[in-house]
Amino acid sequence: MSSRRALVTGGSGDIGAAICQALAADGHYVLVHANSQPARAQSVLDAIRAAGGQGEVVCFDLADCDVTSTALAAVLEAGPIQVVVHNAGIHDDAPMAGMSRTQWQRVIDVSLHGFFHVTQPTLLPMARTRFGRVIAISSVAAQIGNRGQTNYAAAKAGLHGACLSLAREMGSRGITVNVVAPGLIEGRMSEGSFTPEQIKHVIPAQRAGRPEEVAALVRFLASDAASYINGQIIGVNGGMA
């Protein structure tokens, strides 16, 4: 069992909650991050504690570099964060021809700039421990595209390049950096996006995935057993890509 500290951004969402609970089950002290949904993050923490796990809720807007820096400085005073799971992301879908600058900017701010704001301050403290796991949650949209999601796909694809490069930078320090790219996963963010007929046509598995199926991969990548898996983009998409 691990006693490492893990930060999960967007920990109040469906996939984030499943990741938090999976890491807690492995003994991580889980920092459940939220921005606009602190009550939901608290309910995730309550479930972790009810199952015998440990953690706390941390609330900040990771799109704001200064706010994130201040929040993480306080968290890091208690010790290094050795597992960073950047799961936070938002949708603001529109065809690019009708997309506003705000729609483009905000989606990229959360997924891509947020990755830098959260991960960069943790790297040197992590490296001093000679163990680290950075896991970015991307999307199949970054690999094959999706109509109405040029902003979202661009943000998530940016994570791929960042993680592939960071893996090369930190690999000699015992730190691995990988991307998990889910397809259609059950939950609030995907409700109504595909009809059952479309799912059968588009997804070879003929069903949506479950948050727990994404969390299972993250749990493995965060473990000691995954120490030689680095710089990879791994799909959890039922065969979509």
Image (cartoon, grey):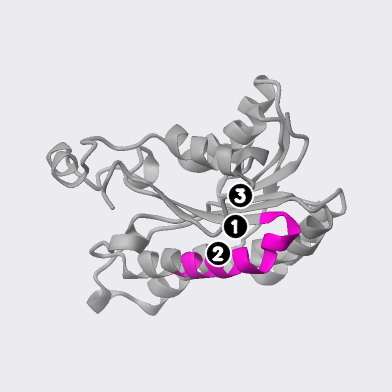
Q: Is residue 166 magenta?
A: yes
In this picture, which residue range is highlighted in magenta?
Answer: 158-175
Q: Amino acid at mark 3?
A: Tyr
Q: Is residue 237 visible?
A: yes
SS assignment at label 1: strand
Front-lying residue, 216 or 11: 216
User: What is the quadrant of the N terminus in the image?
Assistant: top right
Q: Position of residue 198 (x, y in %)?
A: 15, 44
Q: How busy is the neighbourhood of tag 3: few (under 14 within 10 Å), some, or many (20 plus)? A: few
- Is residue 13 something one can see in this rendering? no
Crowding at label 2, few (<14), some or many (≥20) Cα neighbours within 10 Å? many
Identify the residue under disc 1.
Answer: 177
Assign a secondary structure to mark 3.
loop
Tell me which label, 3 or 2, sits earlier in the chain. Answer: 2
Tags 2 and 1 in contact by the CB under 8 Å rule? yes
Please provide percent x and percent y for residue 222: 62, 43
Residue 61 shown in magenta: no
| CA distance for labels 2 and 1 | 6 Å
Percent x, y of residue 158: 47, 70
